[in-house]
Image (cartoon, grey):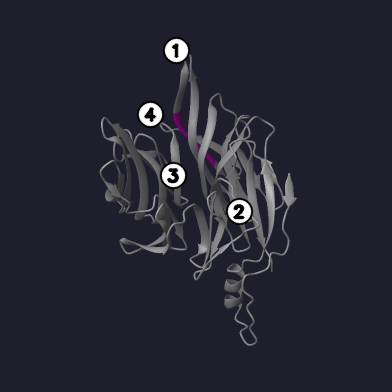
Amino acid sequence: MKKIIFCLLPALIIFISTCNDNPVDKEEQQQNSRDYTWIIDTIQSGSMQTYMNSMWGSSSKNVWISGYDADNSKSIYFFDGTRWSSVNYPPTYFVKHFYAVEGSGTNNVFFVGAANYFNPSPPPNFLDSALVLQYANGNWIYHSINNSSELNALCLVNENEIWAGGSKGNLFRYQGISWERYYLGNEDMLINCIEALNADIVYASGHYEKFIVGQGAYLADYLYRFNGSQWNLIDSNIVSSNYNRQSYPTLIRNINGSIFGSSDFGFVKMVGDAWQVIKPDIYGQFNGTSENNIFLANQDFGVLHYNGKDWYHFNELPWLRYYDVEVFSDAVFLLATDGYTSYIVRGKLNN
């Protein structure tokens, strides 16, 4: 179901030009515009829970979302430019929960997450295993990774260079044949973010926490960089009862060849080995087509747009629990969920 809620949102700035007919300049001005028609799409299979938490698209007419649905045959949805529809993929005897989706083109899309198996032996519980599902030229392929638990992060450097990471410090590299295991940190580390500039510059962030008797919680995040042959620790955040170090953003994205990040200390850009603060005290899911066209969404701030100069707040849009953002030259998609139903706040750029 979809509902059009806004039409002809006025642009914040009106550009008047009498002599500039450069098509590149006009295209850049159009992409940096804040003049959108907004639509909210409701994603609900009819089950008790439709919890979509990851999104990727190659264009505004080829967008995928994935997550968990109580009807386990409907954990992936596809948008063709007109409507959302649940995707039919091969059934399994285990419960699927997808945590990340990413592709390298319209005919090569990967989904990773957890395969939960019921264990009837005392005590009865669920055992989790790595889940990798690939859509390739109309076919669906399940990948097998032995002795691995859930996968939470995914990065496609290119069609033949893929990284996935998850719990127990596990990180895997796929180059078209098999998944090669790397090990970061320790058994208690969760790899929750992977991003790459190219095959020889890949970043991975891992989270670790423990409780120290008499001292309370000890929380740590570690940033690693792959140089083409090995992973090296390059930064860390530490929060404990007697020490607080906030050095790098735990959510990072490659936007047009530059690494941007979001964390408690603000929205930042990687410059050399340092982080340049673009705007302090904002955080959330974000994405963009360039450093002059970035959207950030969060239930604490709503939806913001950065044009390289200033930030604009879309007061008309709801403040939801946003989980992912995809931005194209002609549209923006923001994925949100309330835990039971999922929503796509979708903006179409007005020409």
The amino acid on which the numbered mark 3 sits, given as a three-letter code, is Gly
- Per the rendered image, the range of residues in magenta is 129-134
Mark 4, residue position: 147
The picture places residue 52, in percent across and down from the top left corner, at 58, 40
Q: Quadrant of the C terminus?
A: bottom right
Mark 3, residue position: 176
Q: Crowdedness of circle 3 by 10 Å Cα count: few (<14), some, many (20+)?
A: few
The picture places residue 26, in percent across and down from the top left corner, at 61, 76
In whole angstroms, how far apart are the C-alphas of marks 4 and 1? 19 Å
First reached walking from the N terminus: tag 4 or tag 3: 4
Name the mark nearer the viewer: 3 or 1.
Answer: 1
Q: Eyeballing the image, is 184 above or below 37? A: above
Q: Secondary structure at mark 1?
A: loop
- Mark number displayed over residue 121: 1
First reached walking from the N terminus: tag 2 or tag 4: 4
Name the mark nearer the viewer: 4 or 3.
Answer: 4
Q: Cβ–Cβ below 8 Å for labels 2 and 4?
A: no
Q: Cβ–Cβ below 8 Å for labels 4 and 3?
A: no
